[in-house]
Image: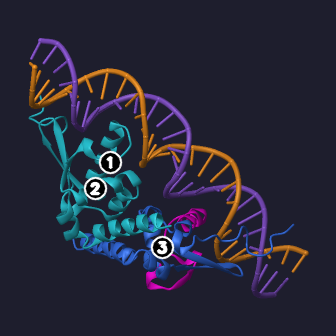
Chain colours: A cyan, B blue, C orange, D purple
Amino acid sequence: MPRSHGRRAALVHPDADAIDVLDVLHALADPTRMTIVRTLRADPERACGTFPVDVAPSTLTHHFRVLRDAGVIRQREDGNRRWTTLRLEDLDARFPALLDTIVTAYDRQANSSAAG
Amino acid sequence: MPRSHGRRAALVHPDADAIDVLDVLHALADPTRMTIVRTLRADPERACGTFPVDVAPSTLTHHFRVLRDAGVIRQREDGNRRWTTLRLEDLDARFPALLDTIVTAYDRQANSSAAG
DNA sequence: CCCCTTTTTCGACGTTCGTCGTACAACGAA
DNA sequence: TTCGTTGTACGACGAACGTCGAAAAAGGGG
């Protein structure tokens, strides 16, 4: 019995109501995943291979799964590519200002480091 | 040569300017440590043994060290006890609204779970 | 001094994490 | 169909994590 469609197992995303803040914090507590999220805040939608991170493709897949399972990103398939977006509205509805505050904090830290 | 004073190795706290937001997120991404932080928001200062967590004393020591190393709490010695406080001002100066937003998100989640 | 309380240190255990290379599956184009 | 591109699945590896029990350190009180 073949899968109905989709690349492999269907992409699973938690319901907005089921997003766990501890999972979100854990997902964001990694520099590669933080870079993914910050990139997504600038560009609304990107294909997997276009993120400015320096890890192996299989590692990137792993990070996308962590973010997806935590409810931070949504991925949709389109032919050969997989497009990724931030679940900003879902996140904001459940945890107002959370993502914004965290990413802003990270940006602030990056700027203060750069400024010496 | 005995230690000058203090229980054992002196308590080390990172400078406010050196607090890393990724370390803070990691420190907060654990239910026991989140409970510690939430307890500290209600009570300004508490002794180690008085937190409503259900882990062994040595595990609690471990969690305090993670929070201390991340710059989330400050601990001071007083005779036989070790008093713990939140580094709210330092945290807020470096990452405005971060701790408050995260803890509020956690409270919100706890309430929504309780309400079913 | 001895004992009790508070908290730490150390070593151990199983689990999870971040990383990778290899193999492979799905799609588009030639 | 064959090839190249895109991205995944799987298995492996070392490191870090959360947990604990046993032992011990430091202080207070008798």
Write down the residue under mark 3.
Answer: B36
Q: Tell me whether the residue at label 1 lies in contact with that at label 2, contact meaning CB atoms closer than 8 angstroms.
A: yes
Magenta residues (range): B40-66
Residue B71 visible to the viewer: no
On screen, A49 above or below D5? below
Q: Position of residue B63 (x, y in %)?
A: 54, 65
User: What residue do we see at 78% from left, 76% from top?
Assistant: B5
The chain containing the residue under callout 2 comes to A
Q: Quadrant of residue A60?
A: top left
Q: Tell me whether the residue at label 1 lies in contact with that at label 3, contact meaning CB atoms closer than 8 angstroms.
A: no
Q: Position of residue C5 (x, y in %)?
A: 67, 77
Question: Label 3: how many residues lie within 10 Å, few (<14), some (14-19) or many (20+)?
Answer: many
CA–CA distance between discs 1 and 2? 8 Å
Which quadrant of the figure contains the C terminus of chain B? bottom left
The reply to the same-chain question for discs 2 and 3 is no
Write down the residue under mark 1.
Answer: A52
* Mark 2 residue type: Thr
**Of tags 1 and 3, which is closer to the observer?**
1
Write down the residue under mark 2.
Answer: A39
Q: Is residue B10 magenta?
A: no
